[in-house]
Image (tube, helix red, strand yellow):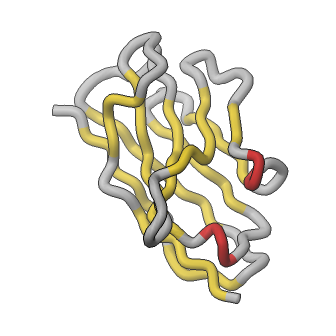
């Protein structure tokens, strides 16, 4: 059974940093893209960042470019999101996701971790 488990969320003041981690199990993710999405109260879930299975050319939502960095662990079953210069508008539940081999749609999702940025 595939599982994605996020950790690292919490409460931080504006301008602070957090590092989210996602550990995936149940299959190999060597050929899967992995990404982060978020959902704020009253809003739809939105794309934050993702990284292809090659590990090259990650993508970011415009509002987080230059502040967030996505990376993958050596085993490819872990993905991280380093979040710097956090803003109150970054407050949301952050979800980790992964695709099937060589796919572009995200089929596997974690339960989410809360990130709250106070002003």
- 12 lies above or below 57: below
What is the residue that sits farthest to the top in this orientation?
102
Residue sitting at x 45%, y 72%: 41
Give residue 100's quadrant in the image.
top left
Q: Relative to 66, is 71 above or below? A: above
Query: Toward which corner of the image does residue 67 lie, by quadrant?
Result: bottom right
Residue occupying the point 37% across, 58% down:
112
Horizontal and vertical percent position of residue 103: 44, 15
Question: Which residue is found at the position 72% from the left and 73% from the top?
Answer: 87
Q: How many tags in the picture?
A: 0
Where does residue 96 sit, x and y in percent of width and height? 44, 46
Q: Nearer the viewer, residue 94 or 41?
A: 41
Q: In the image, is residue 109 above or below residue 95?
A: above
Residue 13, placed above or below residue 26: below
Residue at point 55% right, 19% down?
53
For this orientation, the residue located farthest to the bottom is 119
Kindly indicate the quadrant of the structure image that contains residue 11. Answer: bottom right
Q: Pinpoint residue 97: horizontal percent, then vertical percent.
A: 42, 39
Between 38 and 10, the one nearer to me in the picture = 38
| Residue most extreme to the left | 1
Quadrant position of the C terminus in the picture: bottom right
Please state if 79 lies on the left or on the right of 71 as rendered.
Answer: left
């Amino acid at each position: 059974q595939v599982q994605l488990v996020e950790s690292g969320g919490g409460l931080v003041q504006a301008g602070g940093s957090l590092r989210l981690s996602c550990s995936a199990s149940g299959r190999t993710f060597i050929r899967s893209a992995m990404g982060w999405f978020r959902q704020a109260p009253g809003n739809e879930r939105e794309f934050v960042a993702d990284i292809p299975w090659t590990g090259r050319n990650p993508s970011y939502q415009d509002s987080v470019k230059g502040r967030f960095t996505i990376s993958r662990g050596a085993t490819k079953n872990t993905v991280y999101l380093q979040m710097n210069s956090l803003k109150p508008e970054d407050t949301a539940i952050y979800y980790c996701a992964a695709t099937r081999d060589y796919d572009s749609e995200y089929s596997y999702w974690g339960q989410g971790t809360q990130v709250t940025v106070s002003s």
